[in-house]
Amino acid sequence: MAVSPEKSRPSAFWPLAAIIVPAVGLFARIEIRGAENLPREGAYVIAPNHNSEFDPLVVAVAVWRTGRAPRFLAKESLFRVPVLGAALRATGMVPVPRTSTSANQSMKAAQEIAADGRGVIVYAEGTLTRDPDLWPMRGKTGAVRLALAGDLPLIPMAQWGVQQILPRYGKLKFPRRSRVVVEFGEALDLSVYADTPTQPAALARATDVMMNRVADMLAGIRGIPAPAERWNPSQHGQNETGRLES
């Protein structure tokens, strides 16, 4: 596989990759599917499912192995953590505050990153899935909004197996090296929503299409059908963000 221009340039990712890639390899045997669907150059948005606190590391390694540099929209609180915050800033991650005004500012910053030809990974669910069987739940509109605003490819992504390493809100299982499958899907066709990129109803419909596609991909990996509807936390008395209490 040819190295992309982005990965070939010296950056803060190289020393981090030298540490993180082999460290993740101690826990996960990552099988990548659909790598050809991730653009070799230019900007994009990736929307993965989220079922373990460990899976951002697996997602990052998988993206790096395809030849691109992984950048996330990340919670603002993470940027205040010593060492981690410095690493996030050095690698161009984008903080996402909870307030709507600040969130709009973060969306502008993410668009600037995308305009520079860099990719952004957005967890559309906003937190670990609340679905009891770990299927993707109802998504938020951030990934779609960003893709439409910048006319960027929106790549659905499904991953499975990380929950065997670190169960949702559980404890790390070590030593354990589990098979993890990561699949990049074809870019979604959002052209039908291009004329209404800021209308809430259009954003919600496009987000439903995206999350359904991620669920279908995950069903293929797991070998069982996905639920017909995405889990809605509010309908089950659950908070939309924060730690899930049993």
Image (cartoon, grey):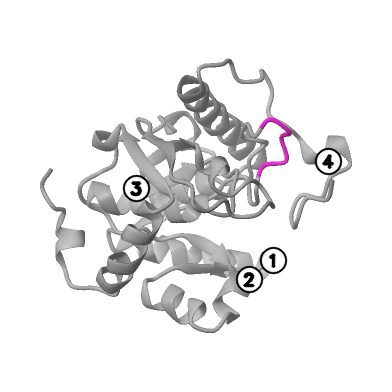
Query: What separation in Å lies between label 3 and label 4 (alpha carbons)?
Result: 32 Å
Query: Closer to the N terminus: mark 1 or mark 4?
Result: 1
Query: What separation in Å lies between label 2 and label 4 (alpha carbons)?
Result: 24 Å
Name the residue beneath numbered marker 2. 102
Q: Residue at x 52, y 53 (%)?
A: 174
Please tell me which residue lies in front, 33 or 143. 33
Within 10 Å of the Cα at label 1, are there few (<14), some (14-19), or many (20+) other Cα atoms? Answer: few
Picture disc at residue 62: 3
Q: Quadrant of residue 86?
A: bottom left
In terms of secondary structure, where does tag 1 sit?
Answer: loop
Residue type at mark 1: give it: Arg
Magenta stretch contains residue 130:
yes
Query: Closer to the N terminus: mark 2 or mark 4?
Result: 2
Between label 3 and label 1, give the one nearer the viewer: 3
Measured from the top left, where is residue 204 in percent x and y?
64, 36
Q: Are marks 1 and 2 in contact (CB under 8 Å)?
A: yes
Magenta part of the chain = 129-133
Measured from the top left, where is residue 154 in percent x and y?
41, 40
